[in-house]
Amino acid sequence: MSGEDIVFDFDRAERIGLDEAVFCQMKSPTHIDAILDGAFARNAGLLLTRLVPEKLAALSAANQARIDYCSISQTAFFGEVRPVFSRGIVAIVGAGTSDAPVAREAARTLRHRGIEAEMIVDVGVAGLWRLTERLEHIRRFPIIIAVAGMDAALASVLGGLVSSAVICVPTSVGYGAAEAGRTALNAMLASCAPGLTVCNIDNGYGAASAAMRIMASAARMRDSI
């Protein structure tokens, strides 16, 4: 794999407001190294997702030194990272600690863009008091990313209690009938709480991207007034 086989979309941020991200799951360390070498040559920062520790360890020493890695979310920041310019807009609400990798992927995606989200975790409906105790605080956030597996009841509960935009992420957490997240996905899609946005299974990156599109649209509306 050489740099000639890679076509960067460096104009994506100007075009749609979202940076190009590198999905590492199906890429070899050699392929990832080639991508990072090309980005470094252009002095470009990148977000890497689904980068397992074994692939990180197989990258060149130079590229490893340029990486900020999170083992929980298996995400990495390559190169310069934007300073935080936004706080208090997005809350990431996770049902259980097993959902943390997906929730962290969403948080890291936002942080790469300069948005610091607040993490509110382990508030699933199995102990509903944990959610209701923090409900007034959660309501302060205009955008909520709800991350849940198993029956994904958290999404419907939040959708019926808050006026915020709710972006739902089903996770593959759960026993057999959870079907690797399909039950959670179907529950979120079939929710009777109106107006929920639902992303793909375990797609914290996609949820964060949806949140950023909402923020960008809101900013354009403010500017047009």
Image (cartoon, helix red, strand yellow):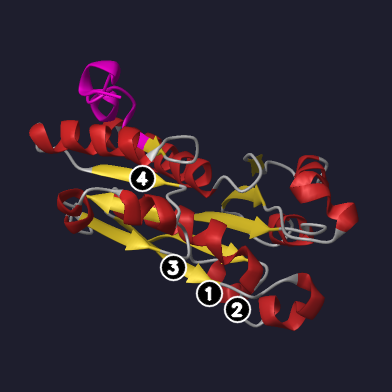
- First in sequence: mark 4 vs mark 3: 4
Question: Can you identify the residue that label 2 sits on?
Answer: 134
Quadrant (top left/top right/bottom left/bottom right) for the C terminus: top left
Which label was assigned to residue 191? none
- First in sequence: mark 1 vs mark 3: 3
- Residues at discs 1 and 2 in contact (Cβ within 8 Å): yes
Which residues fall within the magenta stretch? 1-21
Task: Look at the image and tell me whether residue 192 can be seen.
Answer: no
Q: Position of residue 81 (x, y in %)?
A: 19, 53
Secondary structure beneath dot 2 equals loop
Real-space Cα separation, disc 4 to disc 3, in angstroms: 21 Å
Neighbours of disc 1 within 10 Å: few (<14), some (14-19), many (20+): few
* Quadrant hosting residue 185: top right
- First in sequence: mark 2 vs mark 3: 3
Question: Can you identify the residue that label 1 sits on?
Answer: 137
Question: Can you identify the residue that label 3 sits on?
Answer: 118
